[in-house]
């Protein structure tokens, strides 16, 4: 009987842990950087969200090779990578703070989202 109670307690703790992670996932709003980009379907094909220190990005359409840059609000580059779409990636941001993620398309159009990393 003690083993059954112990297993139930462990499963309950694991379930609460997953529930906490699901609640803390914040979807980023992706928007055009300068207003000249009128291809709103492109912004809709980019999704990003932050869960604790984990940033997840995915592209639902093939929009070519996209430059993804993560910077602090002060402009310091934290991470920069070229990604062939459609695909996705996950990046761990070790330091709490406010950040901006910028997506630059092959034609030069830029989209961005702002997010906060908290403990």
Image (tube, rainbow, N blue to C red):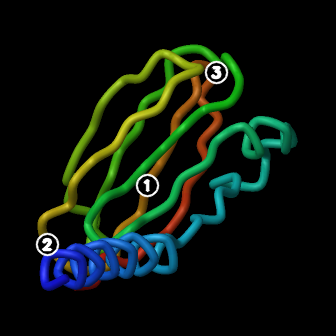
Q: Secondary structure at mark 3?
A: loop
Residue 6 versus residue 105 in the image, above or below? below
Q: Earlier in the sequence, mark 1 or mark 2?
A: 2
Q: Estimate the x, y position of residue 16 in percent, counting from the top left.
A: 37, 81
Residue 95 numbered tag: 2
- Nearer the observer: mark 3 or 1; the answer is 1
Pointers 3 and 2 in contact (C-beta within 8 Å): no
Left or right of 93? Residue 101 is: right
Q: Secondary structure at mark 1?
A: strand
The residue beneath circle 1 is: 101
Say which quadrant the C terminus sits in.
Answer: bottom left
Q: Secondary structure at mark 2?
A: loop
Residue 23 numbered tag: none
Binning the other alpha carbons within 10 Å of mark 1 as few (below 14), some (14 to 19) or many (20 upward) gives many
Q: How many marks?
A: 3
CA gap, disc 3 to disc 2? Answer: 32 Å
């Amino acid at each position: 009987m003690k083993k059954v109670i112990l297993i139930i307690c462990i499963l309950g703790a694991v379930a609460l842990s997953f529930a906490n992670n699901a609640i803390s996932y914040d979807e980023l709003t992706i928007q055009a950087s300068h207003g000249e980009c009128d291809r709103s379907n492109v912004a809709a094909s980019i999704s990003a969200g932050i869960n604790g220190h984990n940033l997840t990005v995915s592209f639902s359409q093939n929009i070519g090779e996209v430059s993804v840059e993560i910077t602090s609000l002060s402009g310091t580059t934290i991470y920069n990578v070229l990604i062939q779409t459609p695909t996705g990636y996950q990046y761990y941001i070790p330091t709490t703070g406010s950040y901006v993620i910028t997506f630059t398309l092959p034609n030069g159009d830029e989209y961005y989202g702002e997010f906060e990393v908290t403990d």
